[in-house]
Protein backbone atom coordinates (compact mmCIF):
# COMPACT_ATOMS: atom_id res chain seq x y z
CA UNK A 1 0.00 0.00 0.00
CA UNK A 2 2.55 2.56 -1.15
CA UNK A 3 0.49 5.08 -3.16
CA UNK A 4 0.41 8.28 -1.05
CA UNK A 5 -2.71 9.63 -2.79
CA UNK A 6 -6.21 8.29 -2.14
CA UNK A 7 -7.42 6.40 -5.20
CA UNK A 8 -11.07 6.88 -4.25
CA UNK A 9 -13.32 8.90 -2.00
CA UNK A 10 -16.27 7.67 0.02
CA UNK A 11 -18.58 9.45 -2.40
CA UNK A 12 -17.05 7.54 -5.32
CA UNK A 13 -17.37 4.28 -3.39
CA UNK A 14 -21.03 5.02 -2.66
CA UNK A 15 -21.53 5.62 -6.37
CA UNK A 16 -20.00 2.21 -7.11
CA UNK A 17 -22.39 0.58 -4.63
CA UNK A 18 -25.36 2.32 -6.26
CA UNK A 19 -24.36 0.92 -9.65
CA UNK A 20 -23.34 -2.66 -8.90
CA UNK A 21 -24.07 -5.12 -11.72
CA UNK A 22 -26.90 -7.52 -11.02
CA UNK A 23 -27.12 -11.28 -11.50
CA UNK A 24 -26.90 -12.94 -14.91
CA UNK A 25 -30.37 -14.41 -14.94
CA UNK A 26 -29.85 -16.26 -18.22
CA UNK A 27 -26.87 -18.17 -16.81
CA UNK A 28 -28.75 -18.86 -13.59
CA UNK A 29 -31.79 -20.11 -15.47
CA UNK A 30 -29.60 -22.39 -17.60
CA UNK A 31 -28.18 -23.91 -14.41
CA UNK A 32 -31.66 -24.51 -12.97
CA UNK A 33 -32.86 -26.12 -16.20
CA UNK A 34 -29.85 -28.45 -16.42
CA UNK A 35 -30.19 -29.41 -12.76
CA UNK A 36 -33.69 -30.72 -13.47
CA UNK A 37 -32.35 -33.14 -16.11
CA UNK A 38 -29.50 -34.72 -14.11
CA UNK A 39 -29.63 -38.35 -13.00
CA UNK A 40 -30.82 -37.80 -9.43
CA UNK A 41 -34.02 -36.98 -7.59
CA UNK A 42 -34.76 -33.24 -7.61
CA UNK A 43 -33.00 -31.44 -4.75
CA UNK A 44 -31.09 -34.53 -3.65
CA UNK A 45 -27.71 -32.78 -3.78
CA UNK A 46 -29.04 -30.10 -1.49
CA UNK A 47 -26.73 -27.10 -1.05
CA UNK A 48 -24.49 -28.27 -3.90
CA UNK A 49 -27.30 -27.51 -6.34
CA UNK A 50 -27.69 -24.01 -4.90
CA UNK A 51 -23.95 -23.40 -5.13
CA UNK A 52 -23.84 -24.44 -8.78
CA UNK A 53 -26.64 -22.02 -9.62
CA UNK A 54 -24.95 -19.26 -7.58
CA UNK A 55 -21.67 -19.81 -9.42
CA UNK A 56 -23.28 -19.66 -12.85
CA UNK A 57 -25.33 -16.61 -11.93
CA UNK A 58 -22.41 -14.55 -10.72
CA UNK A 59 -19.76 -15.81 -13.12
CA UNK A 60 -22.22 -14.99 -15.89
CA UNK A 61 -21.58 -18.28 -17.66
CA UNK A 62 -22.97 -21.77 -17.92
CA UNK A 63 -21.68 -24.22 -17.00
CA UNK A 64 -19.71 -22.56 -14.17
CA UNK A 65 -16.03 -23.37 -13.63
CA UNK A 66 -13.68 -23.33 -10.64
CA UNK A 67 -10.36 -24.14 -12.27
CA UNK A 68 -8.64 -20.93 -11.12
CA UNK A 69 -9.60 -20.12 -7.51
CA UNK A 70 -7.66 -17.55 -5.51
CA UNK A 71 -7.34 -17.07 -1.76
CA UNK A 72 -6.51 -13.48 -0.79
CA UNK A 73 -5.43 -12.83 2.80
CA UNK A 74 -5.10 -9.21 3.92
CA UNK A 75 -2.97 -8.34 6.94
CA UNK A 76 -3.10 -5.19 9.04
CA UNK A 77 -2.44 -4.06 12.60
CA UNK A 78 -4.83 -2.35 15.01
CA UNK A 79 -4.07 0.39 17.51
CA UNK A 80 -6.78 -0.92 19.83
CA UNK A 81 -4.64 -4.04 20.40
CA UNK A 82 -2.62 -1.97 22.89
CA UNK A 83 -5.68 -2.21 25.16
CA UNK A 84 -4.95 -5.88 25.88
CA UNK A 85 -7.86 -7.19 23.82
CA UNK A 86 -5.95 -10.12 22.33
CA UNK A 87 -4.10 -13.10 23.73
CA UNK A 88 -1.21 -12.33 21.37
CA UNK A 89 0.96 -9.22 20.80
CA UNK A 90 0.75 -7.23 17.56
CA UNK A 91 4.12 -8.48 16.30
CA UNK A 92 2.40 -11.81 15.66
CA UNK A 93 0.68 -10.30 12.61
CA UNK A 94 3.99 -9.83 10.76
CA UNK A 95 5.30 -13.16 12.05
CA UNK A 96 2.25 -14.97 10.70
CA UNK A 97 2.58 -13.18 7.35
CA UNK A 98 6.12 -14.59 7.17
CA UNK A 99 4.70 -18.00 8.05
CA UNK A 100 2.20 -17.70 5.18
CA UNK A 101 5.01 -16.76 2.83
CA UNK A 102 7.08 -19.74 3.99
CA UNK A 103 4.19 -22.17 3.53
CA UNK A 104 3.83 -23.07 7.21
CA UNK A 105 0.30 -21.96 8.09
CA UNK A 106 -2.97 -23.86 7.99
CA UNK A 107 -4.16 -21.76 5.06
CA UNK A 108 -1.15 -22.89 3.02
CA UNK A 109 -2.09 -26.54 3.46
CA UNK A 110 -5.74 -25.87 2.67
CA UNK A 111 -4.85 -23.94 -0.47
CA UNK A 112 -2.62 -26.78 -1.62
CA UNK A 113 -5.43 -29.26 -1.02
CA UNK A 114 -7.80 -27.07 -3.07
CA UNK A 115 -5.21 -26.28 -5.77
CA UNK A 116 -5.82 -22.61 -5.04
CA UNK A 117 -3.50 -19.66 -5.60
CA UNK A 118 -2.69 -17.97 -2.26
CA UNK A 119 -1.84 -14.28 -2.23
CA UNK A 120 -0.97 -12.40 0.96
CA UNK A 121 -1.34 -8.61 1.05
CA UNK A 122 0.39 -6.61 3.79
CA UNK A 123 -1.06 -3.23 4.71
CA UNK A 124 1.56 -1.08 6.45
CA UNK A 125 2.17 -3.47 9.34
CA UNK A 126 4.73 -1.12 10.90
CA UNK A 127 2.03 1.52 11.35
CA UNK A 128 -1.17 0.25 13.00
CA UNK A 129 -4.45 2.10 12.75
CA UNK A 130 -5.10 4.50 15.60
CA UNK A 131 -6.74 3.28 18.80
CA UNK A 132 -10.44 3.70 18.09
CA UNK A 133 -11.23 4.21 21.78
CA UNK A 134 -9.60 7.63 21.37
CA UNK A 135 -11.20 8.60 18.04
CA UNK A 136 -11.32 7.36 14.43
CA UNK A 137 -9.01 4.48 13.54
CA UNK A 138 -8.43 5.90 10.04
CA UNK A 139 -8.90 9.04 8.04
CA UNK A 140 -11.09 8.82 4.95
CA UNK A 141 -8.03 8.90 2.68
CA UNK A 142 -6.42 6.01 4.58
CA UNK A 143 -9.59 3.94 4.52
CA UNK A 144 -10.15 4.57 0.81
CA UNK A 145 -6.54 3.77 0.00
CA UNK A 146 -6.88 0.44 1.79
CA UNK A 147 -10.10 -0.30 -0.11
CA UNK A 148 -8.39 0.49 -3.41
CA UNK A 149 -5.52 -1.78 -2.47
CA UNK A 150 -7.97 -4.60 -1.83
CA UNK A 151 -9.51 -4.08 -5.25
CA UNK A 152 -6.21 -5.06 -6.84
CA UNK A 153 -6.63 -8.65 -5.64
CA UNK A 154 -9.29 -9.17 -8.32
CA UNK A 155 -7.31 -9.98 -11.45
CA UNK A 156 -8.31 -11.29 -14.86
CA UNK A 157 -8.85 -15.03 -14.94
CA UNK A 158 -9.79 -15.55 -11.29
CA UNK A 159 -12.99 -17.62 -11.24
CA UNK A 160 -13.61 -17.75 -7.48
CA UNK A 161 -12.18 -15.46 -4.80
CA UNK A 162 -11.85 -16.61 -1.19
CA UNK A 163 -11.17 -13.78 1.26
CA UNK A 164 -9.52 -13.82 4.67
CA UNK A 165 -7.57 -11.64 7.08
CA UNK A 166 -4.75 -11.58 9.59
CA UNK A 167 -4.58 -8.87 12.22
CA UNK A 168 -4.16 -9.03 15.97
CA UNK A 169 -7.10 -7.17 17.50
CA UNK A 170 -9.40 -7.45 14.52
CA UNK A 171 -12.14 -9.44 16.27
CA UNK A 172 -12.52 -6.43 18.57
CA UNK A 173 -12.72 -4.21 15.53
CA UNK A 174 -15.27 -6.56 13.94
CA UNK A 175 -17.45 -6.46 17.05
CA UNK A 176 -17.32 -2.65 17.12
CA UNK A 177 -18.28 -2.41 13.44
CA UNK A 178 -21.23 -4.77 13.93
CA UNK A 179 -22.46 -2.87 16.97
CA UNK A 180 -22.29 0.40 15.02
CA UNK A 181 -24.03 -1.05 11.96
CA UNK A 182 -26.76 -3.08 13.64
CA UNK A 183 -27.03 -1.89 17.25
CA UNK A 184 -27.25 -3.94 20.41
CA UNK A 185 -25.01 -4.21 23.43
CA UNK A 186 -21.28 -4.51 22.86
CA UNK A 187 -21.18 -7.71 24.91
CA UNK A 188 -23.51 -9.37 22.41
CA UNK A 189 -20.99 -8.88 19.61
CA UNK A 190 -17.76 -9.66 21.51
CA UNK A 191 -16.20 -13.10 21.79
CA UNK A 192 -12.91 -14.58 22.95
CA UNK A 193 -11.15 -14.19 19.60
CA UNK A 194 -7.66 -15.64 19.92
CA UNK A 195 -8.61 -17.11 23.29
CA UNK A 196 -8.59 -14.30 25.84
CA UNK A 197 -9.41 -15.02 29.48
CA UNK A 198 -12.27 -13.43 31.44
CA UNK A 199 -10.31 -10.25 32.11
CA UNK A 200 -9.39 -10.02 28.44
CA UNK A 201 -13.03 -10.46 27.47
CA UNK A 202 -14.01 -7.59 29.78
CA UNK A 203 -11.32 -5.42 28.20
CA UNK A 204 -12.72 -6.20 24.74
CA UNK A 205 -16.24 -5.26 25.76
CA UNK A 206 -15.00 -2.05 27.37
CA UNK A 207 -12.97 -1.17 24.26
CA UNK A 208 -15.99 -1.59 21.99
CA UNK A 209 -18.22 0.44 24.32
CA UNK A 210 -15.65 3.21 24.57
CA UNK A 211 -15.02 3.15 20.83
CA UNK A 212 -18.69 3.60 20.03
CA UNK A 213 -18.88 6.61 22.37
CA UNK A 214 -15.68 8.09 20.93
CA UNK A 215 -16.97 7.78 17.35
CA UNK A 216 -20.60 8.93 17.25
CA UNK A 217 -20.62 9.24 13.43
CA UNK A 218 -19.94 5.49 13.10
CA UNK A 219 -23.63 4.75 13.67
CA UNK A 220 -24.76 7.18 10.98
CA UNK A 221 -23.05 5.74 7.90
CA UNK A 222 -21.57 2.29 7.15
CA UNK A 223 -18.39 3.66 5.62
CA UNK A 224 -17.92 5.87 8.65
CA UNK A 225 -18.24 2.73 10.77
CA UNK A 226 -15.47 1.14 8.72
CA UNK A 227 -13.27 4.24 8.92
CA UNK A 228 -13.75 4.88 12.62
CA UNK A 229 -13.75 1.34 13.98
CA UNK A 230 -12.19 -0.85 11.29
CA UNK A 231 -8.71 -1.69 10.14
CA UNK A 232 -6.70 -1.52 6.95
CA UNK A 233 -7.20 -5.21 6.23
CA UNK A 234 -10.96 -4.99 6.80
CA UNK A 235 -11.21 -2.01 4.45
CA UNK A 236 -9.20 -3.97 1.87
CA UNK A 237 -11.66 -6.86 2.12
CA UNK A 238 -14.56 -4.50 1.45
CA UNK A 239 -12.71 -3.17 -1.59
CA UNK A 240 -12.02 -6.68 -2.89
CA UNK A 241 -15.71 -7.59 -2.56
CA UNK A 242 -16.71 -4.52 -4.59
CA UNK A 243 -14.15 -5.22 -7.30
CA UNK A 244 -15.21 -8.87 -7.49
CA UNK A 245 -18.82 -7.83 -8.05
CA UNK A 246 -17.84 -5.53 -10.90
CA UNK A 247 -15.68 -8.26 -12.48
CA UNK A 248 -18.31 -11.02 -12.03
CA UNK A 249 -16.21 -13.10 -9.64
CA UNK A 250 -18.12 -15.03 -6.95
CA UNK A 251 -16.71 -14.59 -3.44
CA UNK A 252 -16.28 -16.89 -0.45
CA UNK A 253 -16.11 -15.01 2.85
CA UNK A 254 -14.19 -16.40 5.81
CA UNK A 255 -15.23 -15.94 9.44
CA UNK A 256 -16.29 -13.15 11.78
CA UNK A 257 -13.86 -10.36 10.91
CA UNK A 258 -14.19 -10.98 7.18
CA UNK A 259 -17.99 -11.06 7.34
CA UNK A 260 -18.03 -7.89 9.45
CA UNK A 261 -16.06 -6.10 6.73
CA UNK A 262 -18.54 -7.36 4.15
CA UNK A 263 -21.45 -6.22 6.33
CA UNK A 264 -20.40 -2.61 5.74
CA UNK A 265 -21.45 -3.09 2.10
CA UNK A 266 -24.65 -4.91 3.09
CA UNK A 267 -25.63 -1.96 5.26
CA UNK A 268 -25.03 0.37 2.28
CA UNK A 269 -27.12 -1.85 -0.05
CA UNK A 270 -28.80 -5.11 0.94
CA UNK A 271 -27.98 -6.57 -2.51
CA UNK A 272 -24.26 -5.81 -2.29
CA UNK A 273 -23.36 -9.29 -0.99
CA UNK A 274 -25.55 -11.34 -3.35
CA UNK A 275 -22.40 -12.57 -5.13
CA UNK A 276 -20.92 -13.71 -1.78
CA UNK A 277 -21.32 -16.94 0.16
CA UNK A 278 -20.13 -17.25 3.75
CA UNK A 279 -17.77 -20.22 3.85
CA UNK A 280 -18.10 -21.21 7.50
CA UNK A 281 -19.61 -20.28 10.84
CA UNK A 282 -16.99 -19.14 13.33
CA UNK A 283 -17.42 -20.14 16.97
CA UNK A 284 -17.30 -16.42 17.77
CA UNK A 285 -20.86 -15.80 19.05
CA UNK A 286 -21.08 -12.51 17.19
CA UNK A 287 -20.67 -14.33 13.89
CA UNK A 288 -23.89 -16.31 14.30
CA UNK A 289 -25.69 -13.10 15.21
CA UNK A 290 -24.21 -11.37 12.18
CA UNK A 291 -25.12 -14.20 9.80
CA UNK A 292 -28.72 -14.03 10.97
CA UNK A 293 -28.74 -10.27 10.51
CA UNK A 294 -27.46 -10.33 6.93
CA UNK A 295 -29.37 -13.48 5.98
CA UNK A 296 -26.45 -15.75 5.11
CA UNK A 297 -26.25 -19.51 5.67
CA UNK A 298 -22.65 -20.74 6.04
CA UNK A 299 -21.43 -23.66 3.94
CA UNK A 300 -19.48 -25.28 6.80
CA UNK A 301 -19.83 -25.35 10.59
CA UNK A 302 -16.74 -27.06 11.97
CA UNK A 303 -16.04 -25.15 15.17
CA UNK A 304 -13.23 -23.15 13.56
CA UNK A 305 -12.02 -19.70 14.66
CA UNK A 306 -8.55 -19.44 13.15
CA UNK A 307 -9.07 -16.69 10.60
CA UNK A 308 -6.38 -16.28 7.90
CA UNK A 309 -8.88 -17.36 5.25
CA UNK A 310 -8.84 -20.95 6.48
CA UNK A 311 -12.59 -21.55 6.36
CA UNK A 312 -12.90 -19.90 2.96
CA UNK A 313 -10.03 -21.97 1.57
CA UNK A 314 -11.59 -25.15 2.93
CA UNK A 315 -14.93 -24.36 1.28
CA UNK A 316 -13.34 -24.07 -2.17
CA UNK A 317 -13.40 -27.85 -2.54
CA UNK A 318 -17.12 -27.89 -1.72
CA UNK A 319 -17.76 -25.31 -4.43
CA UNK A 320 -15.57 -27.27 -6.84
CA UNK A 321 -17.62 -30.37 -6.10
CA UNK A 322 -20.83 -28.45 -6.83
CA UNK A 323 -19.51 -27.30 -10.21
CA UNK A 324 -18.16 -30.76 -11.07
CA UNK A 325 -21.45 -32.51 -10.33
CA UNK A 326 -23.41 -29.90 -12.24
CA UNK A 327 -21.24 -30.03 -15.37
CA UNK A 328 -20.20 -33.68 -15.32
CA UNK A 329 -23.25 -35.69 -14.37
CA UNK A 330 -25.21 -37.42 -17.10
CA UNK A 331 -28.76 -36.43 -17.88
CA UNK A 332 -31.59 -38.93 -17.76
CA UNK A 333 -31.72 -38.82 -21.57
CA UNK A 334 -27.98 -39.26 -22.19
CA UNK A 335 -27.64 -42.09 -19.63
CA UNK A 336 -30.76 -43.92 -20.75
CA UNK A 337 -32.17 -43.73 -17.24
CA UNK A 338 -35.92 -43.50 -16.84
CA UNK A 339 -37.01 -40.22 -15.29
CA UNK A 340 -39.73 -40.19 -12.67
CA UNK A 341 -43.30 -40.20 -13.89
Image: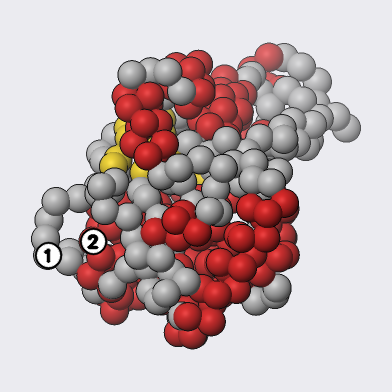
**What x and y, as percent, mark residue 200?**
63, 53
Residue topped by disc 1: 5
* CA distance separating discs 2 and 1: 8 Å
Identify the residue at image location x=45%, y=30%: 65
Where 330 falls versus 64 (above or below)? above
Circle 2 Cα neighbour tier, 10 Å, few/some/many (<14 / 14–19 / ≥20): many
Q: Which mark is residue 81?
A: none
CB within 8 Å, label 2 to label 1:
yes
- Single out the residue that lies furthest toward the left: 4
Where 73 falls versus 276 (above or below)? above
Identify the residue at image location x=72%, y=35%: 303
Where 38 falls versus 183 (above or below)? above
Residue topped by disc 2: 145
**What x and y, as percent, mark residue 194?**
59, 41
Identify the residue at image location x=71%, y=65%: 187
Where 338 falls versus 3 (above or below)? above
Query: Nearest the camera: 279 or 43?
Result: 279
Identify the residue at image location x=28%, y=57%: 146
Q: How is the image coloured?
A: secondary structure
Image quadrant where residue 280 sits: top right
Query: Nearest the camera: 129 or 143?
Result: 129
Asked whether the viewer can see residue 14, the reply is yes
Q: Is residue 19 left or right of residue 338?
A: left
Task: Give the SS element for disc 2.
Answer: helix
Image quadrant where residue 11 sits: bottom left
Q: Is residue 312 left or right of residue 200?
A: left
**What x and y, as percent, mark residue 167?**
43, 46
Q: Is residue 26 left or right of residue 227?
A: right
| N-term mark: 2 or 1 | 1
Quadrant (top left, top right, bottom left, bottom right) of the C terminus: top right
Query: Nearest the camera: 215 or 239?
Result: 215
Task: Give the SS element for disc 1.
Answer: loop
Amino acid sequence: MSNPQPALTFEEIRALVRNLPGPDLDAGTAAVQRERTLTKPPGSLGRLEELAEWLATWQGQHPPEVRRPRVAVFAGNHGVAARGVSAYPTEVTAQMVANFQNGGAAVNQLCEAADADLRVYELDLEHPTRDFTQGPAMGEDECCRAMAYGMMAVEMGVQLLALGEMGIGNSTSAAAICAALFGGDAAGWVGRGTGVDEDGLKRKVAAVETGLKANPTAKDDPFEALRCLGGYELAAIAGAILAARMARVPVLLDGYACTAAAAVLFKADRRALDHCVVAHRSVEPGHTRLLETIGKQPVLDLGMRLGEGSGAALAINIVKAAAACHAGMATFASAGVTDRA
